[in-house]
Amino acid sequence: MSGELIVVSNRMPTAAVPSGGLVFALHETLRKTGGIWIGADPEHHASPAGQLKKIGDQTFYKRLAFEISEEDHETYYLGFANSVLWPVCHRRGDLVQMSRSFEEGYRRVNRRLAEQIVNVAGPNDMIWIHDYHFFPLASDLRSLGFAGKLGFFLHIPFPALGDLGALPSSANLAQWLAAYDLVGLQTRSDVARCLEMFRSETDAELMPDGKIKYGDNRVAVRSFPIGIAVDAFVAAAKETFEHAELDGDLKDDLVIGVDRLDYSKGLPNRFRAFGRYLETRKDRSRRPSLLQIAPPTREEVSAYRDIRHELEELSGRVNGENAALDWTPVRYIHRNIDRDVLAKLYRQARVGLVTPFADGMNLVAKEYVAAQDPEDPGVLILSRMAGAAEDMTQALLVNPYDIEEMSEALAQALDMPLAERKRRHAHCMEQVKNTDVLRWNESYLAALKESRSTFSWAKFYSNGAESNV
Ligand code: GDG
């Protein structure tokens, strides 16, 4: 008898129909298949409950929340997940904050969540766990006797072997990942780095079927490049754009950037490159605007406050040096913009500027391409370090550390002839369609269904444990 699909992610939408790329796609999947979505309760509790609780709309599938305390939030979420794992995975070992309490909080929340999941999961259920908040969850679920299929998808870059050294020694990524049946990563380069990690482990062995054998476990590691809900995005972008929504000087030569305000997104260098372009542009009558939308995120972490101050200072400087009475070169919006407005702004923009230092995929690059008018498309400037660059090779690929190169790419993009814009856009759009998020969902789940559960009941009983599923 086949079981239910259970999705686990730190953030879970509570609205009947959630907005946003990934969340919307997982919602669409669960709407079709039914099942359960488990996520963290946004409220913090002095004594977190021992069971999952229903939260939000329950129409098509169950939404169950696990409670966390203020201390859990500080140690598991802000601490280990976002001050250790996030910087390590984004090649910023210098920003790692070490604290035993972070490690303990991370392990405590994962173990507690595993206990709560086995109380609701049936033996044939298939659990799909998302992202770095839950690396050890499969290992915890297996030790409690869960025997169904366990899948994992990492949305952020898989760290290089050298960067893994910045993790505390209690974080055994290889052992944690080996407890899954299928580990999904964004790109082929991520898979290569993950395999390199396993190769460096004496307990791991690459099997003829491509799986990794680690102790008694066998895990498959594959890339599943994520995308956007293409049709929905194209439709939103096509709606008549109200020019009244923009000030006069935003209508021409608009360059757009959209990113959570995160140090991995390379925003200061982007502002510097735009400033450099303004200084060196040949046609001084040209007055491009950079519209940077950067909603706040994780502001309790000091590295995020630092990047905010740096950006405010830089946007002030570029404007101070270049603005005219009737022209503001940099528009920096530090808040969330409605998704439909965003889609239309992308379509209006001549250039999409996506320049992260490290990024699992980067959906903004795909949204920008999908939003363009194919008969008069804008140009995507894309960092080589974004996962999206692996397939979108006809974007203008740049090194996000090279201000001069990015400034030259801006000049090239703003002057690009229509025929070249159309050719590059058509190629990028093909890649966007190939990775439509609904297809991504289906292909991952099909691969997870086919994967054989690594769990050994014989071993479990021989250890004298009792089943509680
Ligand atoms: C992680 C990985 C991977 C941004 N500002 C606003 C807004 N957004 C939306 C964008 C886009 C999404 O947020 C950001 O997605 P990204 O992929 O660019 O980046 P992360 O948030 O870091 O996501 C990343 C992704 O997971 C999926 O696997 O691609 O590499 O880091 O959809 O449009 N949306 C609205 N207003 C804003 O102001 N409505």
Image: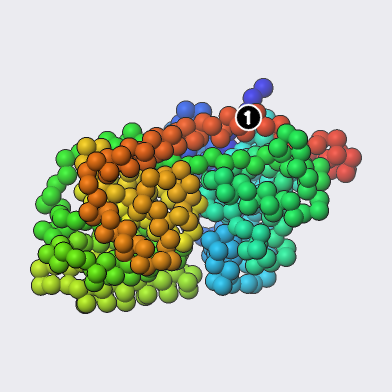
Q: Which residue is mark 1?
A: 449
Q: Amino acid at mark 1?
A: Lys
SS state under label 1? helix
Foreground of the two, 365 or 313: 365
Image quadrant in which the N terminus is located: top right
Foreground of the two, 467 or 76: 76
Snapshot quadrant of residue 219: top right
Snapshot quadrant of residue 24: top left
- Residue 221 in the image: x percent, y percent? 65, 42
**Left or right for 252, reference 330:** left
At horizontal 76% and vertical 35% (from top left) the residue drawn is 208
- Residue 266 in the image: x percent, y percent? 41, 64
**Left or right for 212, reference 276:** right
At horizontal 41% and vertical 66% (from top left) the residue drawn is 402
Foreground of the two, 37 or 367: 367
- Residue 128 in the image: x percent, y percent? 59, 40
Image quadrant in which the C terminus is located: top right
Q: Is residue 58 above or below residue 143?
A: above
- Does the residue tagged 1 have its C-beta within 8 Å of any atom of ligand 1? no
Snapshot quadrant of residue 319: bottom left
**Left or right for 37, reference 182:** left
Q: Is residue 363 visible?
A: yes
Q: Is residue 104 above or below residue 254?
A: below
At horizontal 61% and vertical 32% (from top left) the residue drawn is 447
- Residue 379 in the image: x percent, y percent? 29, 49
Q: Identify the coloring.
A: rainbow
Q: What is the number of callouts on the image?
A: 1
- Using a 10 Å C-alpha cutoff, classify the residue at mark 1 as few (fewer than 14 neighbours), some (14 to 19) or many (20 or more): some
